[in-house]
Amino acid sequence: MLDTKLSRRGFIKASAATAALASAGTAGFNQWSNNYVKAGGKAEIKEIASTCNACSSKCGMIGHIKNGRLWKLTGHPDHPYSKGKLCARGHGYATVVYSEDRLTQPLKRVGEGKFEPITWEKAYEEIAAKLNKIIKEFGPQSVALTEDPRATGKFYSPRFINALGSANYYTHHVVCSNARDAGFLHTVGVTATSADISNAKYIMFIGRSYGDGIRPSSVQSLATAKDNGAKIVIVDPRLNNTGNLATEWLAIRPGTDLALVLAMSHVLIKESLHDLEFIRNYTMGFEEYAKELRKYTPEWAEGITGIPADSITRIAVDMGKAKPKALIEQSWRGAFGCNYENSTETGRAVAMFNALLGNYQQKGGSIFGGKVNLGKLDEKKYPNPGEPDEPQAGSKQFPLAYKGSGVATIVAKEALEGKMKAAIYYHSNAALGYGNPKVMKEALSKMDLVVAIDVQMSETALLAHYVLPEVTYIERDEVIEGLSGKIPGIALRQQMVEKVHPQTKPVHEIYTELARACGVGQYFNFTLDDLNEAMLAPTGITYKELKEKGTIMFPDQEITLGEMPELKTPSGKIEYYSETYKAAGFKPIVEWIEPKVSPANDSFRLITGKQAIHSHTQTANIPILMQITKDYDLERIWINPARAKVLGIKDGDLVEVKSSEAVSKIRVKVTERIHPEAIFVPSHYGITSKDLKTGYGIGFGYMEHVPFDFEKWSGSGNIHEVIVNVRKVKS
Ligand SMILES: Nc1nc2c(c(=O)[nH]1)N[C@H]1C(S)=C(S)[C@@H](COP(=O)(O)OP(=O)(O)OC[C@H]3O[C@@H](n4cnc5c(=O)[nH]c(N)nc54)[C@H](O)[C@@H]3O)O[C@H]1N2
Ligand SMILES: Nc1nc2c(c(=O)[nH]1)N[C@H]1C(S)=C(S)[C@@H](COP(=O)(O)OP(=O)(O)OC[C@H]3O[C@@H](n4cnc5c(=O)[nH]c(N)nc54)[C@H](O)[C@@H]3O)O[C@H]1N2
Ligand code: SF4
Ligand SMILES: [Mo]
């Protein structure tokens, strides 16, 4: 058996690396702001409150505008995610507004990788004619729309596709948190809870790293918990960059977290450390669940996870004693968002473990956030297209998947089968990030119409028949965003500078004009301001006030801890036993599921994760952020020294990574911070679009190695079910 014990020395080295990364972010910002100070020192500075768009957190920020140019950004002090600070990406990505590689006009593809300019009117006319023809011939279920759901898209995108008569609206969650979302939804009634980290006494992170998958306020709250003496356990095959705040690292064998959670749950019940009163009041099916758990002993889990049985018992007991101020944080993508055949079940097991601790809606526990009651457009004046009759494609195969996200890669599957004929991608680089790019390319190439709405020539845009250029988030107003949390709030993204490229448009205009061309303009007979005014109506806040403040929190609507809200599960309780699962043909009680593939002695499992300075594929073309990659050699893959030695590989060597799908060449970082069975790939590289001159050719795209697949429960991409061999090659 491989030695998975990791040394104290490795742990300390990791902390130093975290510090280096943090300071790298600051250096990047200074350089960036110097680059963009084009104005004289005495120019008047205008401040505009808005939100960041460098990742899905959409932190509140203040733009400082000098002589009409974006000069610098600061974190919005009132926004719950930024709390006055932005991360390195937040500062760096804003330079996209002045990027030389932006799309500046609508384009029509005239050959592979060849595009010609087209006017907006002509583009709308041609897209509408094709869409209407496809719908007439094959039905509205043959068209789909996929996006990263941000403020405006969240409202306009589903409305647009519904107006065409199709329910095929999808989000990127199929390769993010579809599995966690499904597991949580069918257990506690919401796709994700949040966590009262700063007040917690015992926190376990399973494949969630606040120090890498950054949100500034999360890092702050963890630091507070640490200062208050909280125990912080990181479960990760890799010692991630939250290591310097942690008290313990469990180097788990990737793909086996479900076994760990089941065994810890077993211990809680066996030692009578579960919260019986909470279970009696707020859950159902506990008896059957407890019976199933009897076989999941810590000794059994040790054999699967590689974590010693006595550590599992000790931690579970300590968490039981610290309850309800103890929790497994709800996690996001890293361990069970979309990665393994057992990911949905892991999500379910985690939500159930937290119920054993009775930590829901408790100080220091898991939180169901409150929301501000926002208004709607008056349907008499502004007709709503409503839900189409035909169900969302994929919803029959994957009935447990959360409908609001759907299973986006079903679009590719059905395109390959000849069923899906047209796809619109808004703010989404599906061709590179959603599934194996070869399969995605083949699927997109088979469709009669692909439209991409982007700000740069992404890999998806390259495969589109029409590319529509949006203004960047620095140049547009958006729909109001509701913020859920202990204290709920609202935030507004606002235009900070005039359009840099006159031929670009904000997406609400694009949808409105395209809908008119398609003959469904009646569903878009309002302005963005009409919509925002309607949303604000019940809040007592004026649009003017929101525009001035950007973020407004509602402390008078703070949730009351200790009081459970009404749960949205079918039984209204936390479900240890799920009739929904049963009806869908799955076991109603959670159980151990093997990952689909496992490495042999001479191979590895490929895993991926975030780096603090990049977001998916969208930041790879930002020079100021990519420079940090270069300076700190961050595109390298991670390999454990014991395995590297056997393979004759030294730190910095060039290696070949070979899977069933692809072969890549890349240099290695040899480090004790990674489990011997895993190869870690930083997830933000491998840009293949030559129009993205900064990102092109650096590192390799993780997805190239991922077989195109669907997890049986939630339809998510199974993106860590990948086995690779590694060998040294000459540079
Ligand atoms: N810097 C940065 N921050 C981001 C984003 C970004 O792109 N960049 N994107 C945002 C988005 S959309 C998301 S989804 C979140 C993601 O946030 P996270 O889920 O926290 O991010 P990841 O880095 O993908 O995964 C976290 C950890 O999971 C570990 N991991 C991998 N496999 C396993 C496993 O089998 N078991 C366990 N226990 N751990 C495993 C990885 O080593 C990694 O350290 O980040 C958000 N914030
Ligand atoms: N290789 C790789 N694959 C991944 C991940 C990864 O890190 N690497 N992460 C996984 C996760 S957790 C997630 S959530 C998904 C994310 O997958 P996506 O949501 O597809 O995210 P990105 O890959 O960053 O692509 C975003 C696209 O939106 C464009 N864009 C940026 N700003 C704007 C804008 O203002 N308007 C418009 N119209 N377009 C804009 C960018 O140019 C880019 O083409 O990917 C998953 N897959
Ligand atoms: S976490 Fe960073 S990149 Fe994401 S929205 Fe906040 S500041 Fe922007
Ligand atoms: Mo994500």
Image: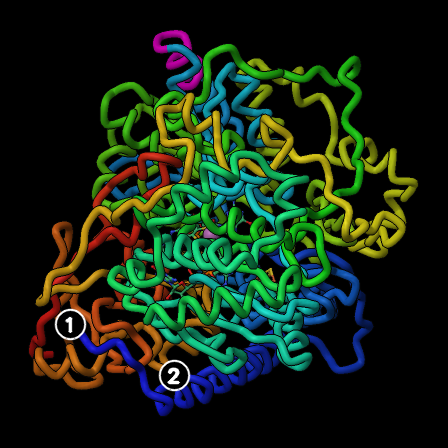
- Looking at the picture, which amino acid does disc 2 mark? Asp
Q: Is residue 398 visible?
A: yes
Label total for image: 2
Residue 429 lies, in percent from the top left, at 40, 46
Label 1 SS: loop
Image quarter hosting the N terminus = bottom left
Q: Which residue is mark 1?
A: 1
Query: Is 510 in the magenta?
Result: no
Which of the two residues, 228 or 12, is positioned nearer the viewer here? 228
Query: Is 135 in the magenta?
Result: yes
- Relative to 360, 600 lies left or right: left
Which circle marks residue 717 in the picture? Answer: none
Q: What residue sits 58% from the left and 49% below the top?
A: 355
- Looking at the picture, which amino acid does disc 1 mark? Met
Image quarter hosting the C terminus = bottom left
Mark nearer the viewer, 2 or 1: 1
Which circle marks residue 631 in the picture? Answer: 2
Label 2 SS: helix
Q: Is residue 279 above or below residue 672?
A: above
Q: What residue sits 85% from the left and 47% below the top?
A: 557
Residue 88 lies, in percent from the top left, at 55, 72
- Relative to 517, 152 lies left or right: right
Q: What residue sits 68% from the left and 79% below the top?
A: 228
Q: Is mark 2 within 8 Å of ligand 1?
A: no
Report the Cα–Cα distance between label 2 and label 1: 37 Å
Q: What residue sits 38% from the left and 75% below the top?
A: 239
Query: What stretch of residues is rendered in magenta?
Result: 130-138
Q: Is residue 501 visible?
A: no
Q: Is residue 338 above or below residue 516?
A: below
Residue 168 lies, in percent from the top left, at 46, 24
Q: Is residue 174 above or below residue 160?
A: below
